Structure formats: C-alpha cells, structure tokens
Image (cartoon, helix red, strand yellow):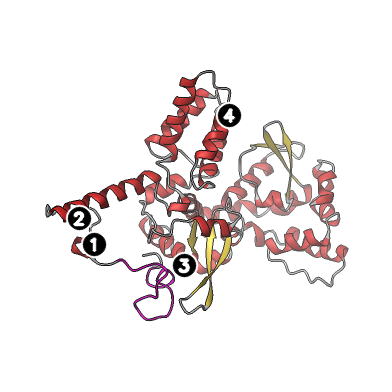
Amino acid sequence: MRKSDVLLFSPLKGYEYYLSECTKEVLMAIGGVFAVKLPTSLRKNEMSKRLADALLNNPESWLNLIPLYELKVLKKLLELSPKQALLIQREAPLLITAQVKLIMNETVGTNYQYMIHDDVRRSITPCIDSILDNRLQRGDEKVEQLICGLLNIYGRLRIEDLKKRLLAMMEQLQLPTVDIDDYFNHSLLVQLNLMEWENETVDGEMFIETYIVNPVIQDGEWYEENENHDLDRNRYYPIETVLDYGQFPYIQPCGPEAEAFYKYIVHTFKLKEEDAPGVFTNLWIEIQAEITPIESLAAHISGNPFSSINEVDNYMKHYAAFANNIPRWLLRGYSSNDISRRKEEAESFMNSMNSGDMPMNDPFGFGNMSMMRKQGRNEPCQCGSGKKYKNCCGKGN
C-alpha cells in the first residue's frame, strides 16, 4: 500500500483520509476482503468514499467477520487514549485489520506499535461490546481455536473434511449449534485461507477441490508435490491436543520433546519471556517448510555463537528430538518417528508371517486383511466411478 507508507503516524489523519491516498488496486483489494462491491468504472475518489462509507457507517458488517483475536485487539485499542499505542510482539501474525490499515502500525524495536484511527474509533465504539459478547456466547473463540489447531497440525484440509471434523468436535465440546456453511462463508479466518487444487480422474477429466490451508503455505504446488502420498489418511489427534495446538497467536510446545526443546532454547539463547513464543513458532514453521529439517538445522548452527563442539552436539540432539516428534504437514500430521515406528511394525509383522509365528494382534488392527493387495492411489477406483482412488473412495480414508 504504497502511499500509506509515508503517511504520518497519527490517528488524526483518519481512515477516510488514508483511503483517499490509496491506489485503485489497493481499494479494490480492501473491498475484496470485506465483500464491498466496488465497480471498476468508479473514479478513485468515488471508490474511496464508497469504501469509507461501507466500513465506517456499517461497522457491524466487518466486526462479525474478523477473527475474535483481532476483535479483542480493537477492544484494547479503544480502552487506550487516542495518543496511546498498543505494543504487540513482532512475531504475532499480521492482523487483517492492520493489513487493510483499519488500524495503523509501525515497527518499534522488536515490537509492532498499533494505533487506531479516530474515525474508526468513533465508528466501532457503540457496537463492539455487544458484538464481542455475542460472538463469545456462540462459541466463536473455541471454533477458531479448533480451526487453528487443525491447520497447525495438518497444514491443509479439504474444506468438507474440516467441516465434518469441526462439527464432531463442537458437539463433543457441547458448543452451540451453528450453520457451518454460513459460518465458513462469513469468517475471514476461513475465506482468506482457501486454496484450490486441480486434480484429475483416471480418464483425464479435471476437477477442482477446495482446501483450507495454514496461512504460512504460499506455494500450493510445492506442497502437493512433496506431500507423502503413500499415507492414505491423516493421523488422528484427540480434541484436547487440537485445542493445545490452536492456542492463538503462537504455537504451543505440546509433548515432552517440544517442551524440553522450548526450555532449552530459552535457557541456551537467553530469550526474554515475551520473545520465546515467537522464536519457537518460527522454528516450527521452518521445519514444516522443509522436506527434511537438516537445512534449517545447519543454518541454526552456523548462525548461533556456539562455543564448543559439545554445545553444537547438545543443540542437535534437542533439535532432532523436537523435529522428529512434532506433527509434520507433509506427513499428514504424522511425525517422522511415527513413520519410522509404522515401518518397523510392518517389517516385524511381515517377518513373523513368513516365519509362521503369527502375532495375536495385528499392529495395524486389520487382521488378515493386511495381506490383501493395497489399492494404488493413482489407480482407477474399484467402485467404478472413473476417478483415481485417491480422489474417490480413498479420499480421507
């Protein structure tokens, strides 16, 4: 948003003034986020006035769309005087409201400093409390936590799979019943993180599948290319684990290896308490963005002032234990150690079959069916639909 970068950091300028300084492309982008229709035939000043009117005179329309975390940030800003700013750690994810400059931000040291435009303040003050209360009562906070948890575990999910899993967990938590399709259509947390993948049937017919993806994933083709396609289902996690991974805005250390690594980096690198969650989250993301985390490990070793080989060795051990035990997006939520154990169990089971020493329990729980030939992911589905197995009966199976 070019011209906004040089605007004075003052709430007195107002959001309407900011919009008047934007290009048509930026105005169209902001309108797209908040579903405000802006005909391209409008002149720039007409477009900025229409957008300002929609957002400032009808704040309920977008206050109900943004994630609850952002609504709470806006509430905090309203509690400050117009000359005060709210400091948020640099590693916190960029707010939708900051991206479209409903609030202003500038970098101050290791933090972001947020201020709210005076005209935005006047617009949302009369209604924000009631909207916040209503959304808390209908369980939006828990729903968003579940969505974030699933995306932090799996990286991406088919939108229909997410809806099914979400409804089941909401019922388990006894959350108020909602129209899930309507909720998804009116949640920017969902709408801004949708991505389409093109697949094909065995006959070569193309079809589109819609996924919701973790915001970190920018290159969908790389993800599709490097995902482990030998895994025919996502690893299951209980609802308590999903909630742990969905705590906003940082990924929490879940499990003994992650907790040990978290404590280790805080102690070794003398991290401040407020900086540690962001550093840990960035390490998590780096691991997810690698087919194997060796490159990230090498970069950390070369970029940190270790004083001895023993320190390097100790870091490698903690890092490896952490990286090998967290859910990996490219492994459909399985950890590297999960895959190793599955392979060892399969080899042990087949060895016992060949030796005639049949185990009492099949390690995969399939009994004699484990001897049947596995349906290939790219082979025609046996149901006769004409689609590939992975896009038909094998989907999510």
Q: Amino acid at mark 1?
A: Ser
Q: Are marks 2 and 1 in contact (CB under 8 Å)?
A: yes
Magenta extent: 374-394
N-term-proximal mark, 2 vs 3: 3
Q: Amino acid at mark 2?
A: Asp
From the top left corner, tell me how far across and down residue 382 is, in percent.
Answer: 34, 77
Q: Is residue 146 magenta?
A: no
- Alpha-carbon distance for marks 2 and 4? 45 Å
As drawn, is 298 to the left or to the right of 12?
left
N-term-proximal mark, 2 vs 4: 4
- For label 2, the residue is 362
Task: Give the numbered dot on residue 370.
Answer: 1
Determine which quarter of the picture holds residue 6.
top right
Query: Where 271 falls versus 3 (above or below)?
Result: above
- For label 3, the residue is 160
Q: Secondary structure at mark 3?
A: helix
Q: Secondary structure at mark 1?
A: helix
Task: Between residue 176 and residue 323, name the one nearer to us.
Answer: 323
From the top left corner, tell me how far across and down residue 68 is, in percent.
Answer: 57, 51
Task: Give the numbered dot on residue 205.
Answer: none
* Image depth: mark 2 or mark 4 in front: 4
- Alpha-carbon distance for marks 2 and 3? 32 Å
N-term-proximal mark, 4 vs 1: 4
Q: Secondary structure at mark 4?
A: helix
N-term-proximal mark, 2 vs 1: 2
Q: Are marks 2 and 4 in contact (CB under 8 Å)?
A: no
